[in-house]
Image (tube, rainbow, N blue to C red):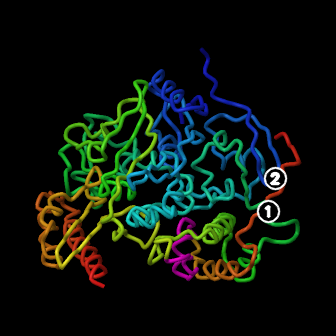
Amino acid sequence: MREFAYQKAGDVSGAVALLDADPEARFLAGGTNLVDLMKSGVERPTRLVDVRELPLDRVESTPDGGLRIGATVTNSDLAVHPEVRRRYPMLAQALLAGASGQLRNMATVGGNLLQRTRCGYFTDLSKPCNKRTPGSGCPAIRGEHHNHAVLGASAYCVAVHPSDMAVALAALDAVVHFETVDGPDALPIGWFFLPVDETPHRETALPPGALITHVSLPPAPVAARSRYRKVRERASYAFAIGSIAAALDVRDGLVHDVRLAYGAVASRPWRARAAERVLAGASADAETFAAAADAELAAARPLAHNEYKVTLMRNLTVAVLSELAEEAGR
Amino acid sequence: MAVSTSSVITLHINGEKFTLPVDHRTTLLDALRERLDLTGTKKGCDQGQCGACTVLVDGRRTVSCLQFAIAAEGREITTIEGVADGEQLHPVQQAFLDLDGYQCGYCTPGQICSAIGMLGEHADGWPSAATEDVRPEAGPPPLTADEIRERMSGNLCRCAAYASIVEAVARAAEAPAASRIDARPNTKEQAA
């Protein structure tokens, strides 16, 4: 590991100024991903600016009925917050499905959004990787890719985003707020994560040196009946091979409102807009749910060893929407 | 400007203060084991995947391999050496002994610290991924075997003593003080 300077940030503007002055510095929050990447040599910062003690650790209700979530709130504290569990159960479930109890107690909301892919080639310095070393190639396309992307990938990278939390945030139209030396700014989550295209090393639209300060959730009455379901290769403590965040409001047998996002299928949390369009106003039955999944997955381009994900996501969509519709009918 | 890559830090561990110089790259795990001779905390994977290095920080369970020692300054750290009350074992320790919640014992300190933290989380009403209804109105979930397995999934046991571990955690959960760790004042000071 490269030697590094360390300092605790006293305030947000000071933290941002420190990173602006040193492009090789990094913010440190929970450290669950950054420290690991520093050990493997993928990250080699010259300086760590510890932001854990900044006053960004609160979850607050906003006057419009939404939530404002500080960037250093831990995954645990967000998952167990009564208003998250009451208004956005899919978000609580997504957080609880991620990592382990120990890691959830350390990991933060800001860090979760910025965590890197767990593609084995990305973390193996002896292998090429366009995300780590632009232009070096992507061995996953012809290699080990059973848990790689089926949607939105490119010839440059087929890695998936590992976050569970971000899948729920994508379904909930979260807004990511950040600060740079030029002041505060914000990005809707749909624009926060960039498409892969030819630049897989550019993962977010955050300006260099920006510090995520908080995430805001607009009110979403539909989310009161919502669910996050995660499929893994073992029962617990593993990254998803496919996941879904779904919210459904059914009135008189018709879909009144719906939110749908997929995880572990793309380089970013995948908002299933095509499926949502099929569902809007349609009959809330398994046939419609399957047609919606098919509409979304028509764009899927599976590789040799991950075609199962297309079937998996279709089945997940039908199962979870059917459960939510059944609950609505009770 | 010369940039310092080491510092003198003070850690609060098991009710004692330890002051020591560290290279910033030193993890809390390595500081405990290699510098402070607190070798009860074990190094398994060193990647946050096995839970052998679990310690409590400000009462919550964490893995000590993915935090730098310098970032743990000012926090109350409890290791396996600090969970008993003198000769009186912690209820979780006693339950692991009584029910054979281990075989080789390497993962055991992490299992016990994790279980203590987990029982505290449960006492605080936290749901888990095994909880059917996470809404607060549903109330705290009963600590079933499924709940224990899910909540303890961050601790691997390569001997696969899981059946006994689940029984030990369930037994300990019945003890009134099982989720408590002794919060003793920081009176003693040591230089390492």
Q: Badge 2 sits on which subunit?
A: B
Sooner in the amino-acid sequence: mark 2 or mark 1: 2
Q: Which residues are magenta?
A: B138-157
Residue corresponding to mark 1? B182
Please state which of residues A326 and B162 is positioned toward the viewer in this rendering: A326
Residue A171: mark in rendering? none
Subunit that carries the residue with mark 1: B
Residue A231 visible in the picture = no
Relative vertical location of residue B86 with respect to residue A10 in this rendering, above or below: below
Is residue B155 magenta-colored? yes
Q: Provide residue A14's location: percent of width, then percent of height.
A: 54, 27
- Please, what secondary structure does the residue beneath circle 2 have? loop
Which residue of the protein is positioned furthest toward the front in this rendering? A63
Say which residue label 2 marks. Answer: B15
The reply to whether the magenta stretch includes residue A272 is no
- Measuring from the top left, give residue A320's x and y in whole percent: 28, 74
> Which quadrant is the C terminus of chain B positioned in?
top right
How packed mark 2 is, by other alpha carbons closer than 10 Å (few <14, some 14-19, many 20 or more), is: some
The Cα–Cα distance between marks 2 and 1, rounded to whole angstroms, is 9 Å
The amino acid on which the numbered mark 2 sits, given as a three-letter code, is: Gly
Residue A12 in the image, given as x and y percentages of width and height: 52, 32
